[in-house]
Image (cartoon, grey):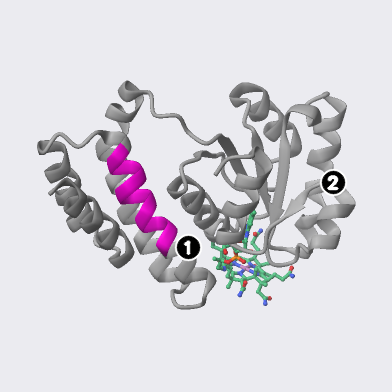
């Protein structure tokens, strides 16, 4: 019975049905399924499948966004219980779009997939100057900083942030991931960051960086 509800939650996430996910999560709670199982065996399992379908080109950005929204609705219903149960997150990731750049669809998609994979994700917004990013890093102490740039003109801001992290002595305690249309693996390497081409690659890279399954 419980397994069936969890499998149905996964299926509803893949289908992107906000209503169905919410009603199934509530059904699971009435059957005393622990929030951690709802998260891992229902919501995250569904989102992992979405990631695989996206990677294989069998699902596209709009469908992934809808699935992520359904998953987030489910997470919202169990968030307090998760905190109470003390379910560990895989790590804290801060995402941001660098100064001068207003594009955030891609970076938010990355954040949703990371959250779906069990990471704690904080997005601090767009058009964010290096000084502000440093301030937020000091405040939230993420394990990974994920920076996005969609313009060739703003891509260079990523280096400014890494230089500032270095200056502040923060670079030893944080990994830096970068992405966005103009960013290349070569550019990432040059500035001392790790590149991911898309959201599913970002999940794999983050897991590798933090050594979690
Ligand atoms: C939507 C869009 C906009 C929207 C943004 C809305 C929003 N809230 O994001 C609006 C209308 C505001 C906009 C404005 C502009 N835009 Co625009 N925009 C686009 C467009 C059409 C789609 C971008 C998008 O969302 N793609 C879908 C997402 C899912 O893909 P993605 O962003 O690439 O993200 C994926 C990966 O790159 C990666 N990724 C992204 N970020 C990160 C971060 C990390 C940490 C990791 C690991 C991975 C990762 O994973 C994501 C998911 O798979 C692109 C064209 C295109 N096809 O890319 C142009 C484009 C990016 N824009 C462009 C331009 C020129 C502009 C403007 C200057 C236009 C103008 N003259 O005003 C302004 C600039 C505004 C500003 N200061 O930022 C150019 C950039 C050219 C360049 N090389 O510099 C593009 C390429 C269009 C073009 N062909 O000319 N834009």
Q: Who comes first in sequence, dot 1 or dot 2?
A: 1
Residue in the picture at 79% in, 64% down:
184
- Up/down of 50 relative to 108, above or below: below
Q: Nearer the viewer, residue 113 or 150?
A: 113
Tell me the element at label 2: loop
Point 46% across, 51% down: residue: 112
Instruction: Name the quarter where the C terminus is drawn.
Output: top right
Whether residue 46 appears in this view of the structure is yes
Which residue is denoted by mark 1 in the rendering?
A: 51
Residue extent of the magenta highlight: 37-49
Label 1 crowd bin: few (<14), some (14–19), many (20+), radius 10 Å: many
Question: Which residue sits furthest bottom?
Answer: 58
Q: How many circles with numbers are drawn on the protein? A: 2
Image mark for residue 205:
none
Q: Quadrant location of residue 87?
A: top left
Q: Is residue 90 left or right of residue 39?
A: right
In front: label 1 or label 2? 1
Instruction: Report the magenta stretch's main SS.
Output: helix
Residue at 85%, 61% in the rendered image = 186
Q: Is residue 87 left or right of residue 168?
A: left
**At which x and y percent is residue 89?**
47, 33
- For disc 2, the neighbor class at 10 Å (few under 14, some 14 to 19, many from 20) is some
**Residue 166 occupies quadrant:** top right
Residue 190 x, y percent position in the rendering:
89, 53
For mark 2, what is the residue? 192
Q: Secondary structure at mark 1?
A: helix
Q: Nearer the viewer, residue 93 or 56?
A: 56
User: Residue at 30% of width from left, 40% of height from top?
Assistant: 37
Query: Which of the four quarters of the rendered structure image does ligand 1 lie in?
Result: bottom right
Q: Tell me the CA gap for discs 1 and 2.
A: 27 Å
């Amino acid at each position: 019975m419980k397994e069936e509800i969890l499998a149905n939650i996964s299926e509803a996430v893949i289908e992107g049905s906000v209503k169905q996910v919410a009603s199934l999560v509530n059904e699971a709670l009435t059957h005393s399924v622990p929030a951690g199982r709802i998260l891992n065996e229902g919501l995250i399992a569904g989102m992992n499948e979405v990631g695989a379908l996206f990677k294989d080109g069998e699902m596209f950005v709009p469908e992934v966004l809808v699935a992520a929204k359904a998953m987030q609705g489910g997470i919202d219903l169990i968030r307090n219980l998760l905190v109470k149960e003390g379910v560990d997150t895989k790590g804290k990731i801060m995402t941001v779009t660098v100064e001068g750049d207003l594009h955030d669809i891609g970076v938010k998609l990355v954040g949703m997939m990371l959250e779906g994979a069990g990471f704690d994700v904080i997005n601090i917004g767009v058009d964010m100057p290096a000084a502000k990013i440093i301030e937020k890093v000091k405040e939230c102490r993420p394990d990974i900083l994920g920076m996005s740039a969609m313009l060739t003109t703003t891509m260079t801001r990523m280096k400014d942030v890494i230089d500032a992290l270095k200056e502040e002595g923060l670079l030893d305690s944080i990994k830096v991931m970068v992405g966005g249309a103009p960013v290349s693996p070569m550019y990432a390497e040059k500035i001392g960051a790790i590149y991911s081409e898309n959201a599913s690659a970002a999940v794999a890279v983050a897991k590798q960086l933090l050594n979690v399954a």
